[in-house]
Image (cartoon, rainbow, N blue to C red):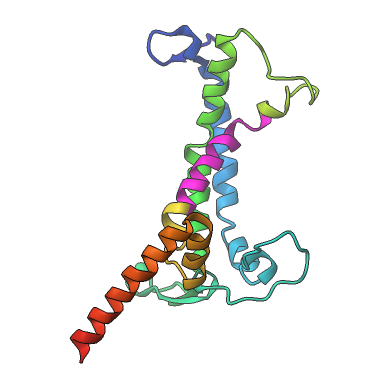
Amino acid sequence: MGRFYWCIGDNHHLCFSGETRALNYIQDYSSHAYLSLFWQLANVMGHFQWLTCPRKDLSTGWLTCDPGSMFKPEHYFLGDWVPQWFPWKEVFLLPVQWHALALGLFASIIAPFGGFFASGFKRAFKIKDFGDSIPGHGGITDRMDCQMVMAVFAYIYHQSFISPHNFSVDTILDQIVRNLTYEEQKSLYQQLGEIFRERQFMQS
């Protein structure tokens, strides 16, 4: 059986063995897709405040907080989306489960390409593995190629769709005290005073 290679552009450093890489991609997709079906795990873990409450220091005490809307069950009516024989017409899901599904799909489809480019990087420098700390499997970096792609996506996804962008009074005051000089704080105080006086004049 002949071997074939996939190449990106004219650079032979970005050629990958199709026999092995295609198989690895299918295996990665199958395993991650199978694991993504267990998005119910997000439902289970979402009920533990130890995992959902934000920690603002290095203490190890027990956490209690309002978990926020992401970890509160929401009602979904299935209606015509399911066949008549389907036993459940409505479900209760945590919004975090949808985020878990999105991350799982990305890990199944895109993250394996981290291994492709890691192979091209090693081919360019004419090395077999990044290290030898794991016998027969290379170094730690060889095992983390997909995770590096996943970490970047998870951060961007969190900042874009999950992280709240509203600011509390305490947060704003903390930024003022930390980042503004005394003269700038005094100027801000005077400008706020003028704004309040104008609003009071308009309301009277």
Query: Where is residue 197, by image quadrant?
Result: bottom left
Magenta stretch containing residue 148, yes or no? yes
* Residue 203 position (above or below residue 75): below
| Front residue of this view, candidates 125 and 66 | 66
| Front residue of this view, candidates 63 and 45 | 63
Can you see residue 15?
yes
| Front residue of this view, candidates 130 and 64 | 64
Q: Residue 69 in the image: x percent, y percent? A: 49, 73
Q: Residue 169 in the image: x percent, y percent? A: 47, 72
- Considering the whole magenta stretch, tell me its main secondary structure: helix
Residue at 55% over, 52% down? 36
* Residue 147 position (above or below residue 204): above
Q: Where, quadrant-wise, is the C terminus in this rendering?
A: bottom left
Count of residue discs = 0
Query: Where is residue 200, by image quadrant?
Result: bottom left
Q: Is 24 placed left or right of 204 in the picture?
A: right
Can you see residue 97?
no
Residue at 42% over, 66% down? 166
Magenta stretch containing residue 182, yes or no? no
Q: Is 14 placed left or right of 20 in the picture?
A: left
Start-end of magenta stretch: 143-158
